[in-house]
Image (cartoon, rainbow, N blue to C red):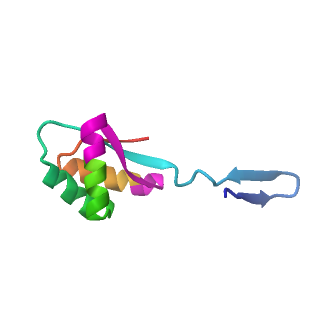
Amino acid sequence: MGSAVIESTPDIEYRQDISNIYANKVILYNDDFNSFYHVEKCLVKICCKSKAESKRIALEAHNNGKAVCYTGSMEACETVAEKMGEANLTVSIE
């Protein structure tokens, strides 16, 4: 699954593990002020989730206090987290 990128110089060989390049996650936290409709709408629009998936994630966050709503590169996760925050949703990146 994870492969290595090898860069060689005359005397040194560097290995970079790229198996975790998309291992970053945006975590959605439950709150008492956003409606399920708003959360689900944001998950569809911002995180590109289906209606069924957005409903599952919203319920998981409601029942467990948090849920993974997006997985990707750090740059993509930062963009998603920023947009979710602008929509008044509480998120973090792990």
Q: Which quadrant, please, contains the N terminus?
A: bottom right
Q: Is residue 1 magenta?
A: no
Front residue of this view, candidates 3 and 5: 3
Q: Is residue 8 above or below residue 68?
A: below
Tell me which residue sits at (82%, 58%) in the image. Answer: 9
Position of 74 with respect to 15 (left or right) is left
Position of 25 with respect to 79 (left or right) is right
Position of 93 with respect to 41 (left or right) is right
Q: Is residue 48 above or below residue 70?
A: below
Q: Position of residue 50 (x, y in %)?
A: 30, 65
Tell me which residue sits at (21%, 55%) in the image. Answer: 40
Q: Position of residue 80 (x, y in %)?
A: 33, 55
Q: How many marks?
A: 0
Q: Quadrant of residue 7?
A: bottom right
Residue 29 showing in the rendered view: no
Front residue of this view, candidates 15 and 92: 92
Q: Which quadrant, please, contains the C terminus?
A: top left
Tell me which residue sits at (19%, 37%) in the image. Answer: 31
Q: Quadrant of residue 42?
A: bottom left
Q: Is residue 75 above or below residue 66?
A: below
Front residue of this view, candidates 64 and 7: 64
Position of 23 with respect to 44 (left or right) is right
Residue 62 showing in the rendered view: yes
Q: Is residue 74 magenta?
A: yes
Q: Position of residue 76 (x, y in %)?
A: 41, 57
User: Range of the magenta residues?
Assistant: 59-76
Q: Position of residue 83 (x, y in %)?
A: 26, 54
